[in-house]
C-alpha cells in the first residue's frame, strides 16, 4: 500500500541548502580567482559542479516524490471536484503542503540571484592582475 512519504529531516534539508549555496558561491568566486589566483579556478569549479550535481539530484528526488503523491492520490482531481478526502489522501495533501513549506528552495534562489549580482559587480570594479 502506498502511503504519503514523511518530510525529510530538517538537518538534511538544511545540509542540501548549504551545499547548493556553497556551490553557488564557488561558481561566483571563480571570477575573482581568475584575477587573483588562477590555480584555484579548477578545484573550485569542480567543487561547484559536484556540489550542484548532488544538490540538483536531491531537488529532482524531492520533485519526483511530490509528483508521485499527487498522481497516486489524485490530489488535484479530488480538490478540483470538491471530493471528500479519505484519511490517506488527507495525509498525502498534508505531506505536499508541509514539503513545500519546509523547503529552503526560495532562499536558495534568492541567494543565487544576490551572489550573481555581487559577482558581476566585483568583476567590473576590482582590478585584475
Image: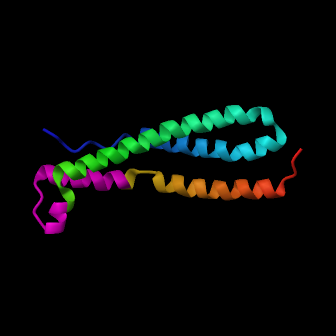
| Left/right of residue 124 with respect to residue 104 in the rendered view | right
Q: Going 36% across and 54% down the picture, which residue do you hit?
A: 100
In this rendered view, identify the residue nearer to me: 37 or 90: 37
| Left/right of residue 24 with respect to residue 123 in the rendered view | left
Q: Going 65% across and 44% down the picture, which residue do you hit?
A: 27
Q: Position of residue 49 (x, y in %)?
A: 58, 37
Q: Which residues are magenta?
A: 77-100
- Residue 33 occupies which quadrant of the picture? top right
Q: Which quarter of the rendering shows the C terminus?
A: top right
Q: Which quarter of the rendering shows the N terminus?
A: top left
Q: Is residue 27 visible?
A: yes
Q: Please check the rendered image and state whether residue 116 is part of the magenta-colored stretch, yes or no.
A: no
**SS majority, magenta:** helix
In this rendered view, identify the residue nearer to me: 121 or 4: 121
Q: Position of residue 62 (x, y in %)?
A: 36, 44
Q: Going 55% across and 37% down the picture, which residue do you hit?
A: 51
In this rendered view, identify the residue nearer to me: 116 or 99: 116
Q: Is residue 11 visible?
A: no
Q: Position of residue 107 (x, y in %)?
A: 51, 55
Q: Please check the rendered image and state whether residue 97 is part of the magenta-colored stretch, yes or no.
A: yes
Image position of 129 with respect to 119: above or below = above
Q: Going 25% across and 46% down the picture, which residue do you hit?
A: 68
Q: Position of residue 103 (x, y in %)?
A: 41, 51
| Left/right of residue 39 with respect to residue 11 in the rendered view | right
Amino acid at each position: 500500500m502506498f502511503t504519503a512519504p514523511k518530510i525529510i529531516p530538517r538537518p538534511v534539508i538544511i545540509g542540501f541548502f548549504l551545499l547548493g549555496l556553497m556551490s553557488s558561491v564557488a561558481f561566483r568566486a571563480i571570477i575573482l580567482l581568475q584575477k587573483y589566483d588562477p590555480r584555484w579556478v579548477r578545484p573550485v569549479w569542480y567543487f561547484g559542479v559536484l556540489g550542484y550535481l548532488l544538490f540538483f539530484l536531491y531537488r529532482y528526488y524531492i520533485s519526483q516524490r511530490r509528483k508521485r503523491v499527487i498522481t497516486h492520490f489524485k490530489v488535484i482531481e479530488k480538490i478540483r471536484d470538491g471530493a471528500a478526502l479519505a484519511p490517506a489522501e488527507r495525509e498525502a495533501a498534508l505531506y505536499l503542503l508541509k514539503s513545500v513549506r519546509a523547503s529552503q528552495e526560495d532562499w536558495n534562489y534568492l541567494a543565487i540571484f544576490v551572489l550573481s549580482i555581487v559577482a558581476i559587480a566585483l568583476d567590473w570594479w576590482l582590478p585584475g592582475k
